[in-house]
Image (cartoon, rainbow, N blue to C red):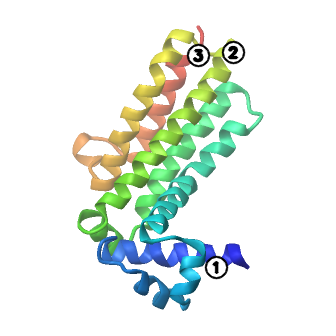
Amino acid sequence: MASKTRERLLDVARQLFASNGVERTTMNDIATASDKGRRTIYTYFKNKREIYEAVIERESEMIIMRLRKVVASNLEPEEKLRKYLEARFDIVEETIRESTTTQIISYITLDYKRLERIRLLSVQKERGLFKEMIDQGVAAGVYDPHQAELLPAIHQMIFQGVDYCHLRNSFEPLGLTSKNIREQVIEFVINKLIVK
């Protein structure tokens, strides 16, 4: 029950932060919207800052959860990398598709800092996961160690570009589609990494 109440408070806080902005959301707003008293909120969180940090952590973890499952799987290194990259593309596409106009407006105006913190925390977590997966492939003798050393930074740059193109829906001016950029990136990364 306690866990459900905490999750409910985080859901409500996330929605209020997205629609009103963090600065304009009060503890009273969260209490009213969640049908809980302020005393209940303070049972779980010391202050709004702590709620904010918990929302950031939870949202970044939700983004990374699918990638964690791929890295923990027993797939062969090449297939694991392929599944990981496919999952990473899926995460970007699903996030954009599920965004409402309100969320996009919120991203551009009130909620930019929160969303940027979630993105940065997710990138930091993803960097460790990606390196772990690549190191497994090097240890198995499947991946070229030199290319493996270069890949994590390149991976982050590739997906910053992919994120931006999806957010701006700007594949067409570049003569690309989201499908062909997905296929080309996956093949490029795998072909560069596999020991020849």
Q: For mark 2, what is the residue?
A: 139
Q: CA distance from mark 3 to mark 2?
A: 12 Å
Q: Position of residue 77 (x, y in %)?
A: 68, 26
Sequence-first disc among 1 and 3: 1
The residue sitting at 40% across, 60% down in the picture is: 96
The quarter of the image holding the N terminus is bottom right
Q: Position of residue 141 (x, y in %)?
A: 68, 11
Crowd class of label 1 (few under 14; some 14 to 19; many from 20; radius 10 Å):
some
* Front tag of 3 and 2: 2
* Front tag of 2 and 1: 1
Q: Amino acid at mark 3?
A: Ile
Residue 139 vertical placement versus 67 (above, below): above
Q: Position of residue 37 (x, y in %)?
A: 54, 90
Sequence-first disc among 3 and 2: 2
Residue 60 vertical placement versus 133 (above, below): below
In the shown orientation, is residue 109 left or right of residue 40?
Answer: left
Q: For mark 3, what is the residue?
A: 194
The residue sitting at 62% across, 51% down in the picture is: 65
Q: Amino acid at mark 2?
A: Ala
Q: Amino acid at mark 1?
A: Thr
The answer to which of 153 and 20 lies nearer the viewer is 20
